[in-house]
Amino acid sequence: MATHLPSPSDLEDLDALTTEAVADSHLMLDELSVPELVTLMNDRDETVAAAVRAVLPAVSDAIAATVERMRRGGRLLYVGAGTSGRLGVLDASEVPPTFGTGPDVVIGIIAGGPAAIVSAVEAAEDDAEAGATDVDAHAVGELDTVVGIASSGRTPYVLGALVRASERGALTVGVACNTSTPLAEVADHGIELAVGPEVVTGSTRLGAATATKMVLNMFSTIAMVQLGKTYRTLMVDVKATNAKLRRRAVRIVTLATEIDDAVAERALEDAGWHAKLAIAMIATGLDADHARAALDDAGGVLRVVVDRASVDGDRPTTSEEPA
């Protein structure tokens, strides 16, 4: 891992990037029919999953290191510019409602600030110092993981952020869609996705963005699974904040416990519409307060609570069975 920024000369030649290469110099994209274009893009997208699969060991190592820190209270921060930054913000914003975390557990930082999420702030990506400043503003520390996202693998804002994060003791990960990149050089864990040229030359919101989103899906989802935010395949920490999500919570409880909807709904009402707590109550026979204490004792991992209840056999008599 390098702890310094590459020189400007290292960042000059776009022609060297595979994401800027021409996929087929003889292809007349603008002369193809809609069915032909749809097929072309779908065929192209089939190659993206293979590019991700080729680097799964690197992805796995980075996630495992991230989870180890998050178990001790660390955060996961995504840093990017343009499309890459938006993908990080998108992934981070979906974690709280899906897994019941606070907004400060997985954080998306984009060059140019929140305005850049909906409107391009193109020059912002060239400011390495701004990347470092944004890392400082989030008080990044030794338990945190900072994932720098840049299709080119050389965006100054992202490089500045990773170098500063490293100086502050954080774990650093670089996700790029080219190979032999400065981003991988400055990161503890480099993930380089060889997605190749885009259908529209240089438009990395296409194949590169798809590959990046696949990796970010793995990062946030697997981290949450490892932290006990799921049970079986169920999102038991989902926040039931509307009618659809309340219905989902009922279904989650019924699938986990094999009780009927009416019993699940009553348990959820007693649990404040927290599916994990409702399942723990049903599995153990405990009331909400005691089931919550059992979950706390198990580090929030529902499977531990359920397995303990199964091993104990007879349910505790300290509370009533949910009606």
Image (cartoon, rainbow, N blue to C red):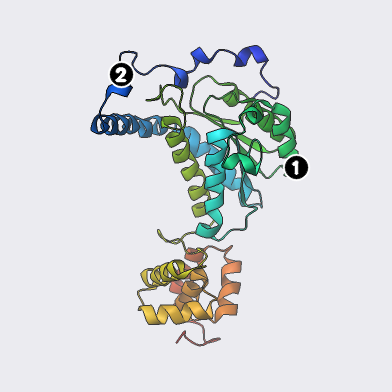
* Badge nearest the viewer, 1 or 2: 2
**Percent position of residue 11, x then y:** 61, 16
Measured as percent of width and height from the top left, residue 278 is found at 49, 74
Precedes in sequence: disc 1 or disc 2: 2
Q: The C terminus is located in which quarter?
A: bottom left
Question: Mark 2 sits on what residue?
Answer: 28
Residue beneath disc 1:
137
Measure the C-alpha gap from mark 1 to mark 2. Answer: 47 Å
Q: Can residue 314 be seen here?
A: no
Whether residue 110 is visible, yes or no, is yes
Q: Is residue 57 left or right of residue 33?
A: right
Q: Position of residue 262 (x, y in %)?
A: 39, 82
Among the 4 quarters of the image, the one containing residue 265: bottom left
Q: What residue is shown at x 53% (from left), y 24% (from top)?
A: 152
**Left or right of 263, for residue 94:** right
| Position above or below: 242 against 30 | below
The local crowd at label 2, few if under 14, some if 14 to 19, many if 20 or more residues have their Cα within 10 Å, is few
Give the quarter of the image for residue 159: top right
Circle 1 residues within 10 Å: few <14, some 14–19, many ≥20: few
Q: Check disc 2 and report its element: helix, strand or loop.
A: loop
Q: Quadrant of residue 145?
A: top right
Q: Amino acid at mark 2?
A: Met
Q: Residue at x 60, y 21 (%)?
A: 182
Q: Is residue 52 above or below residue 31?
A: below
Q: Secondary structure at mark 1?
A: helix
> Label 1 sits on what residue type?
Ala
